[in-house]
Amino acid sequence: MKTRHAYMIMAHGDLYMLQTLVHLIDDPRNDIFIHVDRKWKAFDCRKLKTKYSKLVYTAQRRDVRWGDASMVHAELLLMRTAIAEGGYSYYHLLSGADLPIKSQDEIHRFFHEHAGQEFVFYWETEAHKVDVRYKVERYHFFMRYERGLPRVPSILLAKLRLSVADLLYKVLGPRNAYGVCKGPNWVSLTDELVRALVRDRAQLCRRYRWTRNPDEIFVQTYIRTYHPRQLYRGGDASADYRYTCWQEGDPSPRTLTMADLSVVLQSPCLFARKFSSEVDREVIDAIAAHVRAIEIT
C-alpha cells in the first residue's frame, strides 16, 4: 500500500474553485481523482493541470442528483478508481466546493499521528435519529427529480411519491433501519475501510436504492456496524475535520464569505466548505494565499 493520500473530488461546476482546490492539494505525496458530473457540459480537462500529483478522472461521468442514490454510486466509483492505482493510507472525499485550510505537511502529519482511525461525523440528536429512520424505513422514489423540475410538476411528483410511499409503508411495513445513522458525506477513510465499502458495493447499492439522502447514511452506518472502534473521537462534532457553518432548518451548510475568514483560519479543522467563486471569490483567494504562505515557511 502506498504511504500517500488519495483526494477524491466530486466536481459539478465552478472551474475557478476546482482549479484552486487542485492547486492546493497538488503534492508529491498525493494523487487526485475527480468525478465530473455529467451535467457539467462545458468542463474542459485541459484547464486543470497538476505539477506533482497524478490526476485521474473516473471512467464514467454520472448525472448526480441531490438526495438520490446516484451520489452513492459516484462516491463508490471514485473509491474504485483510487484503489485501482494501488491503495493509499488515507482517502479524502471532497466536493468541488471544498478547500484545505492547512498545509499538506500539517495534513499528512495529522493523519500519520492518527493512523488507522476513520474520520467520520454523525449526528446523535433524537431529531436526527427520527429523520434518518424516516429516510430509510420508507420507500423514496424519484429522488433524482426532487430538485430541478418546474414548480408545478415538482409539487405533483412530490405528492405522488409521498402517496405511494405511505401506501407501501402500510402494506409492507417499515424497511429495516436498525443501527442507521447519518452525517455529512465528506469523510477521510483508511484503505481498509474503502476496500470494504468497494467490496460490498452491490449490497450497499441495493439496500439504499430507495433511500432519501443515502450518501449521508451508508458510510456512517457501515462503520458504526462493522468498524466502531476505529472511529476517531466516536463521531463527535469535529470528527470529520471539516469546518462548516450550519443554519437551523437549512439542508446544507452556508456558503462561506470573507466575513467567515478569521474563524475558518483559526479552526483546528483541516478542510472547510463550502465556497463559491460566484458568491465570494475573495475568500477563496485569501485562504489559498494563507495555505501557500504556510507551505513556504
Image (spheres, grey):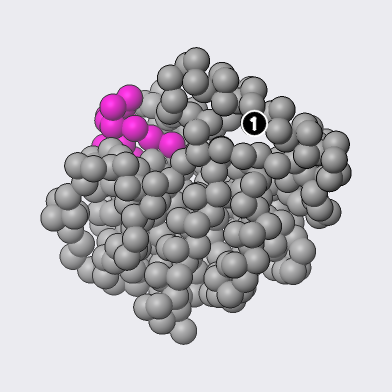
- Tell me: residue 200, above or below residue 102: below
Q: Residues within 10 Å of mark 1 (few under 14, many from 20)?
A: some
- 2 or 252: nearer the viewer: 252
- Tell me: residue 217, above or below residue 141: below
Q: Residue at x 70, y 53 (%)?
A: 235
- 178 or 3: nearer the viewer: 178
Q: Residue at x 46, y 84 (%)?
A: 1
- Tell me: residue 159, above or below residue 56: above
- 68 or 284: nearer the viewer: 68
The answer to which quarter of the image holds residue 258 is top left
Q: Residue at x 38, y 52 (%)?
A: 62
The quadrant the C terminus occupies is: bottom left
Residue identified by numbered label 1: 161
Residue 30, given in percent of the width and then of the height, sits at: 35, 68
The residue segment tinted magenta is 274-288
Q: Is residue 143 visible?
A: yes
Question: From this viewpoint, which residue is outermost toward the left?
Answer: 46
The answer to which quarter of the image holds residue 50 is bottom left
Residue 137, given in percent of the width and then of the height, sits at: 78, 44
The answer to which quarter of the image holds residue 163 is top right
Q: Residue at x 23, y 43 (%)?
A: 41
Q: Amino acid at mark 1?
A: Arg
Residue 196, given in percent of the width and then of the height, sits at: 61, 73
- 68 or 142: nearer the viewer: 142
How many marks the image carries: the answer is: 1
Q: Is residue 286 magenta?
A: yes
Q: Is residue 245 visible?
A: no
Residue 223, given in percent of the width and then of the height, sits at: 69, 63
